[in-house]
Amino acid sequence: MSNAHRMHLKGPWQYRLHDSDSESNVPAVEGRIKLPASWQDCFADYRGGVRYERHFNCPTNLDPHERVYVIFEEIGGDAVVHLNDTQLGTAGGGPAGPFEFEIKSLLQPRNLLTVDVTFHGGNEQPGGLWAAVALEIRGG
């Protein structure tokens, strides 16, 4: 990979809990969090689904030969990733990473990245978007 430039998508992210399979102390149903952060730090012992959302502006001054990717270093749980209501694919489900999706053709002036994560793991493994999420611009 030559000439790569990364822009990290740290907080704040919006989140919304859904499809709880836990009778435990569940935090607020929706809110804002700064990522990366482990599931356990954000949602304690809640198990089920969380929708993470993050707006970002289109990178400027892109050359025609450059490609733009969204990169997830790690995801704890099963994830479905969307950009501007278009499904990019699935990720997670195990300890492997990073996961990346090419997004240049889908970019708009203002973009919405949505990640639906379902986590049923225990406290011994990190869950959710616990590692870096970034946009990466790569030259041709």
Image (spheres, helix red, strand yellow):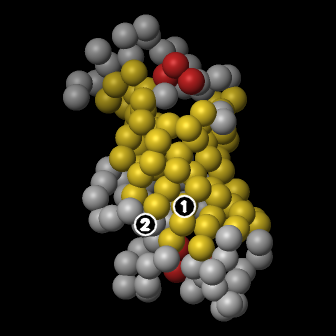
Please identify the quadrant where the C terminus is shown: top left
Residue toward you, 102 or 79: 79
- Classify mark 1: helix, strand or loop: strand
C-alpha distance separating marks 2 and 1: 8 Å
Residue 34: x and y, percent? 60, 62
For disc 2, the neighbor class at 10 Å (few under 14, some 14 to 19, many from 20) is many
Instruction: Determine the residue located farthest toward the top in the rendered image.
Output: 64
Residue 98, compared with residue 18, is above or below; it is above
Q: What residue is rendered at 52% in x and 80% in y?
A: 40
Q: Is residue 14 visible?
A: yes
Please identify the quadrant where the N terminus is shown: top left
State the residue position of label 2: 76
Residue 129: x and y, percent? 49, 61
Residue 13: x and y, percent? 65, 55
Give whichever of discs 2 and 1 has the lower sequence position.
Answer: 2
Q: What residue is rendered at 65% in x and 33% in y?
A: 84
Residue toward you, 140 or 7: 140
Q: What residue is rendered at 38% in x and 62% in y?
A: 93
Q: Could you tell me the amino acid type at mark 1?
A: Val
State the residue position of label 1: 117
Callout 2–callout 1 Cβ contact below 8 Å: yes
For disc 1, the neighbor class at 10 Å (few under 14, some 14 to 19, many from 20) is many
Q: Could you tell me the amino acid type at mark 2?
A: Gly
Residue 18: x and y, percent? 70, 68
Image quadrant of residue 66? top left
